[in-house]
Image (cartoon, rainbow, N blue to C red):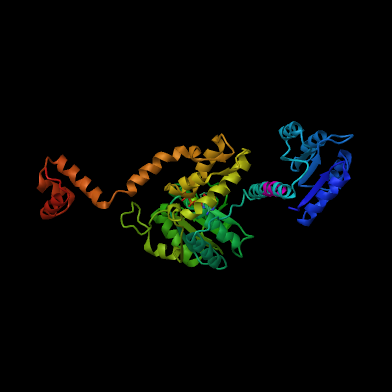
Amino acid sequence: MERKILLVDDEEDILLTMQGVLRKKGYRVTTALNGREALDCLARESFPLVITDLRMPQMSGEELLQQVRSLWPRTAVMVLTGYGSVESAVEAMRQGAVDYLTKPFDPEEILLRIERVFREQEREEENRRLREQLAREAGKRVILGESPQIKQVLELIDKVASTDSTVLITGESGVGKELVASAIHRKSPRRHRPFIKVSCAALPENLLEVELFGHEKGAYTDAYEQRPGRFELADRGTLFLDEIGDISPSVQVKLLRVLQEREFERIGGTQTLRVDVRIIAATNQNLLDPNRAVPFREDLYYRLNVIPIFVPPLRERKGDIPLLAEAFLQRIAAETNRPVKGITEEALTLLQKYPWPGNVRELENAIERAVVLAENEILGTADFAFLRPAEQEWTALEERTLAEVEKEHIRRVLQKVNGNKNRAAEILGIHRETLYNKIKRYKLEV
Ligand SMILES: Nc1ncnc2c1ncn2[C@@H]1O[C@H](COP(=O)(O)OP(=O)(O)OP(=O)(O)O)[C@@H](O)[C@H]1O
Ligand SMILES: [Mg+2]
């Protein structure tokens, strides 16, 4: 912001003295001898600050103040007043002046106060700029974060973006897997081609197959027309297979073939189609877990897991929370048109303590809830009261050692079997001797 000041006073020597003081400090100063002249200056160029005398012939400082407030609301107005007319200065403040100075002036004090106004003006401008930018970017979201963990993810994105390698993104729900996938696409040479997403969990098996590979006319009763699948639509672009852990064994086989050969047939078709598609898959499951209800083929897993990207849960990168919270706050305030401007340090600390089982998405939702329901311009801990019970539960959990949990469990089993140690050892799956030892150690004697 340019440090320009418009000085308005009908006494020329006052204008000259003040101008001298302010110019020495690097302000650009324009002077006007009355309200009319001042309004002309403002019409020609914008000034972040107007300093005006109150008592002037023709147009009073109050009138000028009112005009400026209504015509240039971003311009701050500071008023000058002689001794003994402080009431008029107070009235001017009520009308929207940011501050007042009494004559004769103490140069030091003037400079201090002007500096304060400029700082405030700059802060507001910065907020405005951020809001506009966030509103503009509402459609294309960027990955925010400054923790080493997220920086590592960003570096990995940069590295793989230029290649065609298949990527498997893993991480808990809401950590930003989809955001990572679209970032890879946007930074890749394929960015001008489509980014096609398939939510594998959303569709039953047969529909997912059609969705992926398309069908020929007459492939089945409802197939009146030929229909291209997502693989075709994504040609020369990126195909994002979200929630890949939910695909059935038969679709797994078909997918494996496309990954190996880059070719497939539409359902009901005989013609083999070749596609040039970059594949990114994502899952919040452990695909190799032997206890999975539907096993995931190992060969498919290794085909997908060429470049693994793990997005860590938010609770393991709490350093990102303040930045994310502020950014969400600004964006949501702008989107919902709520007059919320910031958040207290205390509230940020509270947010950093909370474990965020739903990760970044949960944080985003919490901020939205707080912004929409807020009573004040600055969000405080009270605005996040709805997080409190969970936070306490978490603290309680953190404070429990494994030994305490074990002790509690043994105690309950013993109670259930009425102190029958043989039976209890059986249930617990440990030797009777071990159980005796634990009972002694935990003083569980029944
Ligand atoms: N680092 C981040 N910076 C900014 N916004 C983020 C970040 N991470 C996640 N988000 C936002 O959080 C929300 C959830 O992200 P996303 O949908 O990518 O998560 P996900 O891992 O795919 O979740 P799920 O497993 O539930 O599908 C989105 O609104 C996203 O924009
Ligand atoms: Mg997702």
What are the residue bounds of the magenta stretch? 114-122
Q: Position of residue 415 (x, y in %)?
A: 15, 40
Residue drawn where x is 46% and y is 58% of the image:
311
Secondary structure mostly taken by the magenta-highlighted segment of the chain: helix
Magenta-span inclusion, residue 214? no
Residue 192 falls left or right of residue 146: right
Relative height, residue 310 to residue 351 (above, below): below
Q: In front: 350, or 362?
A: 350
State the count of labels.
Answer: 0
| Quadrant location of the C terminus in the rendered image | top left
Magenta-span inclusion, residue 115? yes
Asked which quadrant contains residue 86, the reply is top right
Q: In front: 398, or 165?
A: 398
Q: Position of residue 189 (x, y in %)?
A: 61, 65
Residue drawn where x is 60% and y is 59% of the image:
186
Q: Position of residue 351 (x, y in %)?
A: 47, 46
Residue drawn where x is 53% and y is 66% of the image:
160
Residue 61 falls left or right of residue 131: right
Residue drawn where x is 52% and y is 45% of the image:
364
Q: Position of residue 125 (x, y in %)?
A: 69, 48
- Asked if residue 202 can be seen in this view, the reply is no
- Asked if residue 60 can be seen in this view, the reply is yes
Residue 189 falls left or right of residue 433: right
